[in-house]
Amino acid sequence: MTKKRKAIFYMALAAILWSSGGFLIKGIDWHPMSIAGGRSLLASLIIGFAFRKEKLSFSKSQWAGAAAYCACVTLFVVATKLTTAANAILLQYTAPIYVALLSGWLIGETVNRRDWLTIFLVCCGMLFFFLDKITAGGILGNIFAIGSGITFALFIYPFYAHAKRWFPLWFSPIR
C-alpha cells in the first residue's frame, strides 16, 4: 500500500472511530468510569504502538497534557451517559472558547474583538443546550460536557510551544 493510500485509510478509520464514540458509549451498559477506562486502555495500546520509537521525557508538560486529556475523556464519557451524545460532543467542542479565554493568562496572548464576538455568539448558542432538556441528568450531563471542553482546551496548552515549532504556518499572521 502506498503512503498516500495508507494515510487515507488511517484518516478514514480515525474518522469512523471518532464519530462512533457517542453512539458506542450510549450502547454499552457499563458505568461511565469503566467505559472511560476501557477507552483509555485501548487508546494507550494504539498510541504506544504508533509511537513505540519515541522516547518519553516525562516532562511537566507531558504530565499536564496527560492529566488534562484524562479528565477530558472521563468527563466526556460521563456527559454522554447523562445527556444526549450530540450535546456532549458539541459542548466538548466549545474548547476553542476556553483556549481564547485562557490564552492571556496562560500564554500571554491577547484576544481581539472578532474573537470576543465569536465567543459571545457561541455562548448564546450554548444556552439552547440547557433549554432542550430540563432534567437534572440532562443539565448535569451538559455541565460535564462543558468541563470536557475546558479540559480539552487545557490539553492544548502543554503542547503549544511544540506546535508553534512543528506548524509555523498555523501561527503566522495571514496578510
Image (cartoon, helix red, strand yellow):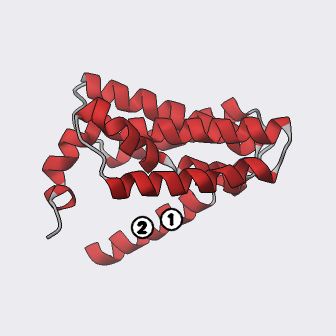
For badge 2, the amino acid type reads Met
From the viewer's side, name the closer residue of 124 and 129: 124
Direction from residue 114 to residue 35 in the image, left or right: right
Direction from residue 76 to residue 111 in the image, left or right: left
Q: Name the residue under label 2.
A: 11
Q: Quadrant of residue 20?
A: bottom right
Answer above or below: position of 133 versus 20. above
Please tell me which residue is depicted at 37% across the width and 54% down the height of the picture.
Answer: 115
- Estimate the spatial distance between the alpha carbons at disc 1 and disc 2, rounded to whole Å: 6 Å
The quadrant of the rendering that contains the N terminus is bottom left
- Helix, strand, or loop for circle 1? helix
Residue 167 place in picture, x, y as percent: 18, 56
Answer above or below: position of 65 versus 112. above
Furthest residue toward right: 135
Answer above or below: position of 84 versus 8. above
Q: Are marks 1 and 2 in contact (CB under 8 Å)?
A: yes
Residue 119 place in picture, x, y as percent: 46, 51
Q: Mark 1 points at which residue?
A: 15
Is residue 89 visible from the viewing direction of this image?
no
Q: Quadrant of residue 81?
A: top right
Is residue 46 visible from the viewing direction of this image?
yes
Q: Quadrant of residue 79?
A: top right
From the viewer's side, name the closer residue of 57 and 68: 68
Q: How crowded is mark 1: few (under 14 residues within 10 Å), some or many (20 or more)?
A: few
Q: How crowded is mark 2: few (under 14 residues within 10 Å), some or many (20 or more)?
A: few
- Helix, strand, or loop for circle 2? helix
For badge 1, the amino acid type reads Ala
